[in-house]
Image (spheres, rainbow, N blue to C red):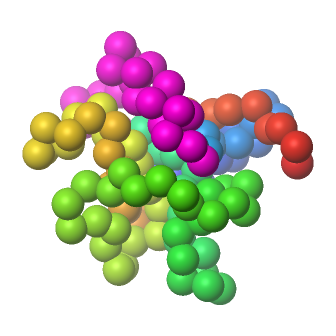
Amino acid sequence: MQWSQAEGSCKFNNKHLVVMETEQEWEFINKQIQTRISGKENEWHIGLYRNLTTGKWTWIDGKTVTIDKWQKDQPQDNNFYALMAKESSGGVKGSFRSIRGDINRGWICEEKTGM
């Protein structure tokens, strides 16, 4: 699924794409994806996007990004959504990569809390 479709699928189930505000949350998700497969690329849509109003990367629940897990030379200026990779081409596990949004990948939903 594409990013917007993945978010729609999460919303249909009263969830949203995963948000990682702390190092501990990122570590938990990273550990989980190491045991899973999502196609040959092993990347998943996460709830990180570029806010069109501010131009800043923001979590889907409106919270500011407080952890830096971007792959080298990321995010790209012309991209608006993010994926989390099982392992990047540089061998880094759990890093983020920006995309345009029209890429089909797996996705990670989480329960909505405090919204």
Q: Is residue 14 visible?
A: yes
Residue 57 rendering spot, x and y as whole percentages: 53, 69
User: Is residue 101 inside the magenta stretch?
Assistant: no
Q: Which residues are magenta?
A: 21-43
* Residue lying at 37% horizontally and 62% vertically, measured from the top left: 99
Is 58 placed left or right of 2 in the picture?
right
Residue 34 rendering spot, x and y as whole percentages: 33, 20
User: Is residue 26 inside the magenta stretch?
Assistant: yes
Q: Is residue 103 visible?
A: no
Residue 13 rendering spot, x and y as whole percentages: 78, 31
The residue positioned farthest toward the left in the image shown: 90
Foreground of the two, 105 or 93: 93
Query: Image quadrant of residue 35?
Result: top left
* Residue lying at 80% horizontally and 38% vertically, measured from the top left: 112
* Residue lying at 54% horizontally and 83% vertically, measured from the top left: 55
Residue 76 rendering spot, x and y as whole percentages: 31, 73
